[in-house]
Amino acid sequence: MEKYVTLAHGAGGQQTSALIHDIFQKYLGNPDFTADDAAVLTSPSGQLAMSTDGFIVSPSFFPGGNIGKLSVCGTVNDLACMGAKPLYMTCAFQIEEGYPLKKLDEVVQSMAKTAKEVGVHFVAGDTKVAGKGQVDGIFITTTGVGQIQPDFHPQGNQAKPGDKILVTGDVGRHGCTILLERNDFQIQTDVTSDCAPLWHTVEAMSQVTKDIHVIRDATRGGVGTVLYEIADESQVGVKIDQEAVPVQNHVKGVCGMLGLEPLYLACEGRMVVIVPAEQAQAILDTLHTLPYSQNAAIIGEVTQDHVGKVVMKTSIGSETLLPSPSGELLPRIC
Amino acid sequence: MEKYVTLAHGAGGQQTSALIHDIFQKYLGNPDFTADDAAVLTSPSGQLAMSTDGFIVSPSFFPGGNIGKLSVCGTVNDLACMGAKPLYMTCAFQIEEGYPLKKLDEVVQSMAKTAKEVGVHFVAGDTKVAGKGQVDGIFITTTGVGQIQPDFHPQGNQAKPGDKILVTGDVGRHGCTILLERNDFQIQTDVTSDCAPLWHTVEAMSQVTKDIHVIRDATRGGVGTVLYEIADESQVGVKIDQEAVPVQNHVKGVCGMLGLEPLYLACEGRMVVIVPAEQAQAILDTLHTLPYSQNAAIIGEVTQDHVGKVVMKTSIGSETLLPSPSGELLPRIC
């Protein structure tokens, strides 16, 4: 008989204990995982990075992943962007009454698998159950603490004129996947989410050189939004070559039909990396050897002029301003 | 003109930046607060405590507080229960499209005020906006990191036969308040939530003695559930004296009319404290000098028999087993 989450699972009594034991402890358990009010952890030396992210993707399962995998990748990648090795994570669930326990089981299994791949430990969690109609299925908020690696401090305000701009893979697949899942466009295609945990990718780049100026994951708002943020924070211009931006043919096709710019579609396993020109090829070569960055590419460079703007050289050779992100780009995709 | 949260506020573009600047940065800003993917923090020495909690209280404003104050108190108190001084917090918002910006402003103001009282810094945040009907108003998940104080390690498995059991104030006010707000019982009364941040309370107790065996905040499931948890974790019995349990007259009245046991109503500013008998009076005297624990009382003791059970001496002198918490006690109150 199929079993469902009930309000009693969230009330703090016997059913809550059973849920923790049967699902959360089962998959996420480790010596640091706590049943107490808070986990007790060894403090890492030096500097900490701390990040939080809430996930309300609909649908919660999609080609290439589910909200559980996404919720670990999102926070792992935010820490990785700061040059921090993910150590500890917490997760908070808000689940709609009636959510199938089997799906919850799969979601938590995906979280455990992704965390294991990265080497991050879940240390505490929380579950609330909301009445039917009060949440849409399942929301997950993850928070992570990482250890900042010595002498490695990529930051959004460090892009310098002359730097090269890389993306770690083809862009827009996550946004395109969710868009197709959520709408009935009658489009037959084969796109899967790029959702992936990128700590090992960042670690490998840091072994090539510690002189990486910026790393940003291109989630909500996509690569285009990230480039505008960096141009603003670093007070530089950004110039990219449209033809150099890797976009899967399936994604290109969908974007063509729907009139979307792939640079504004969310990714959940892609980073924008900005490095001194002389390091760009070595970084690119390393990225090409790693599982989540085989399509990495150099897509442009940082400029002294057009401060705060992103200029795109189009495929027909003209230069155009990438429109500044605004409004409701593509809601509920991350 | 009244302004509302829109989907564009959550899309990661210009409106998201404006929301962060106008509300979150305005109230929660401090030198540790980040606009980057993760905050960079000084790692505390020794051991860390880390805790997360999601808040989905309905209504989001209630007599004595709102969901913002609650979301800070909840995580601060979880850290305090572990003997940890709260240092850093993150917050993740999931907001329903159409939520009034004025209410969001008030919620975030309350968070800032409560954090300031405790001395904890917000360091990172996240905002997602869900479509109308996909969340019920506003959900907040907070995560905190604290510094465990040397030689002070209260834990749920350390209750010992002979220990005295205290509560830091009258019980059940938060649960009673929310119950009355959510239902139209036609009961005229004057109950306000006990919601309060208790780090300074715990700090003061630790200055009396480091030999405090257990501290637990009595949130979901109330004092009764916490006592059962401790009896189980410590493998002891618990005996309490019904007449010694402080309950406000208003709360007694409501419980009488509705047939509720105040020991199972949630508190959001009350702790169960278990100490060696010889320390109990000194702790109680200190609690009585502090703002959030003026009604603190010794309510019972830890026993060798009735392992895993909570026995209550009733007002008529008989002894009865407090029923074990199960099922849907009082949902959505925290």
Image (cartoon, coloured by chain):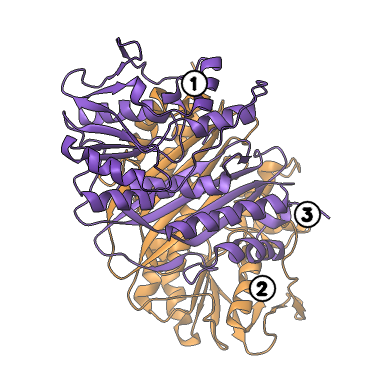
Chain colours: A orange, B purple
Q: Is residue A290 visible?
A: no
Q: Position of residue B232 (x, y in %)?
A: 26, 26
Q: Amino acid at mark 2?
A: Glu
Q: A277 and B105: which one is in front?
A: B105
User: Which residue in the protein does label 2 denote?
Assistant: A243
Q: Secondary structure at mark 3?
A: loop
Classify B5 as above or below A211: above
Indicate left or right for A139 with A262 as reference.
left
Classify A109 as above or below A309: above
Disc 2 to disc 1, C-alpha distance? 50 Å
Disc 2 to disc 3, C-alpha distance? 42 Å
Q: Amino acid at mark 1?
A: Lys
Q: Secondary structure at mark 1?
A: loop
Identity of the residue drawn at 25% across and 45% down:
A31
Choose the circle earlier in sequence order: 2 or 1.
1
User: Which residue in the protein does label 1 denote?
Assistant: A3
Indicate left or right for A66 with A248 as reference.
left
